[in-house]
Image (cartoon, grey):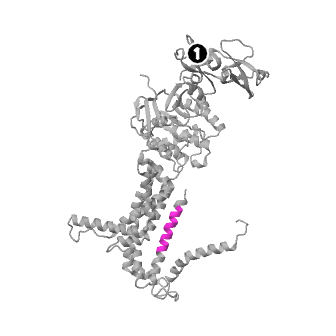
Amino acid sequence: MAEYAVELRNVWKRFPGPGGEVVTAVRDVSLKIADGEFFALLGPSGCGKTTSLRMIAGFELPTEGEVFLHGRPMGRTPPFQRPVNTVFQSYALFPHMTIGENVAFGLQMKKVDRQEVQRRVGEALEMVRLSGYERRKPKQLSGGQQQRIALARALVNRPEVLLLDEPLGALDLKLRKEMQLELKKLQREVGITFIFVTHDQEEALTMSDRIAVMEGGVALQVGDANDIYEHPNCRFVADFIGETNFLDGVVGALEPGKARVDAAGGVSLWAHTPQPVTPGQKVTVTIRPEKMHIRPTATDVNLLSGRVTDVVYIGTDTHYGVTLAGGQTIRVREQNYSAESRLLAREGEPVSVRFAIEAARVLTE
Amino acid sequence: MSSTKRSPWLTLTALLVYFFLYAPIIVLIVFSFNASRTNVVFEGVVNQGPCGPFYWYCQLFRNRDVMEATRNTLVIALTSTFFSTIIGTMAALALQRFDFFGKNAAETSLYFPIVTPEIVMGIGILVLFSAAFGWINAALALAPNQRLTMGLGTVIISHIAFSIPFVTLVVRARLHGFDNRLEEAAMDLGANELTTFRKVTLPLIAPGVLAGAMLAFTLSLDDFIITFFTTGPGATTLPIYVYGLLRRVVTPEVNALSTIWILVVLVVVGISQWFQTRE
């Protein structure tokens, strides 16, 4: 049997709400996270990602379902008996202890002998490039340094799984970008499974091997960055990851793997159907702006006529807003290969928007 | 220093306030060296016996009643501080950490005794003890020498009771803004509940706990009203003893006693302040 570092099997978490009602934070989530994987739980605040992480750590217990660590059911095992460590969003460094004492804490709890503790603390600080900071107090360190100490304090214990709860959330943009790459590099070096909670889709795409997109307590889609971006399985995922267009319509004709979707105002297009659909079914078509092109005089299967309502030039790209016959506005992004690219169309001009059938995806939910 | 000129009236007012606050204490201390037996006129510094100017202080230490009252006061203060600090801290932690049915009621009713007039509390406690003791003594048909009576025990219990809200209040102030993630981090790193409390929670709230303990200690030291209602034979405390003396004649002995007392409280408050301001 293939063993996963972490498995969530049909996990539910319900909390009593402030008004006595029941709040369901996590709904029937099942996840399998492989050994050595960098896995992201991505979603807006309140989607259940942090609660899921806290159930793996043992700070919360599932109302239903089971959490497994390397095949062992965790049941009601308290956090201090689980082979996982957490990096908190607020870092949670002990303010009354020095950096050395902070990093040594976990090893001392495990009764590792003193010389070994000293050696491993030294190694851990070296790993996060903060050697020589042993005697300082957390307060004397910058946010980025504290973040790295929190990482060292967790990794020094060589956990089976490292849990990170928005660890870069409190850092400024530049530092965050640096730390993203550093974390990724660190994870490859130590080979430990990282489970990472974030609401920042770019961060998730940059760092993770696989991503679970969560919303309303449900894990909507699990896959690698490319999969989630190119093959979203529902409207929420398509919308949450990157920018996209939605066209609501009804399935007209069907062909293997594709369908004609008729939208309002006589707008009609062919789109790829990952899930089976039936004629007459109400669906949404998603098309990424960069997969569409403004072609004043093109002919193609998918050719939507409209009028340019706005043009935004941002250097690398030019963004066009095009209003279709049915009143729908779509965004089209043209890359500026040459200096003349920005002159494709002006505001108010009639244009045609062309795209491949594969670029349009029929979503049923 | 700021270069702007402040109105001299402001300084004068401040000085007057301090004068009214401290004049009685200064007079009290000065009169503890009085040559006269009465507290009415200062007739120069006493110089009697081997102790010289500290004559009244020496008299004090030779007075068996005073020594017994001192012993009682300290036993009561230390015991009640010990228990009220533990209970008060636990209450503060529970109120901070858990949401439970009736939490608001529990919190409000905890602080209620602080604003209740002490005399009401005193009478209430007296009635409670007499009723309870009467019932128990009758129910168990205890012989006269075995009967439960008012004494050191009842004073200690009532001091614990009125100190708890103060300890809770001070500890809660310290707990305000306490990051629960710190405890989670400790557990995450392998510390069980007890170790987490010992190594993380307690060190972080220790200044609050110690300040609370000091407050409980000083409250117990100078409590008169509640002690008056709950004390019994052999459980006379210093405030009760001094009150008894006042009804006869106020000798400088009382001043000497008060002076020592003030010094003790001053030291305790100083330590408490030091703990509270320390990070």
Name above or below for residue A307 compared with residue B33. Answer: above
**Residue B262 lies within the magenta run:** yes
Residue at 64% in and 40% down: A172
Q: Where is residue B135 in the image (x, y as percent from the top left)?
A: 25, 65
Q: How many labels does the image show?
A: 1
Rendering coords of residue A315 (x, y %): 75, 28
The residue lying toward the viewer, choosing from A47 and A147, is A47
Q: Which chain carries label 1?
A: A
* Residue on which disc 1 sits: A272
**Which of B173 and A34 lies nearest the eye of the viewer?**
B173
Q: Can the viewer see residue A156 in this picture? A: no
Viewport quadrant of the N terminus of chain A: top left
Magenta stretch: dominant secondary structure? helix
Furthest toward the top, the residue is A255
Give whichever of A117, B100 is nearer the camera. B100
Residue at 23% across, 71% down = B145
Toward which corner of the image does residue B122 lie, by quadrant? bottom left
Q: Residues within 10 Å of mark 1 (few under 14, many from 20)?
A: many
Residue B7: give x, y in percent of width and height: 70, 71
Determine which quarter of the picture holds residue A263: top right
Q: Tell me the SS state at disc 1.
A: strand
Q: Residue A335: x, y in percent?
A: 72, 22
Q: Does B24 appear above or below A319?
A: below
Q: Give the range drawn in magenta.
A: B261-274
Can residue B277 be seen? Answer: yes
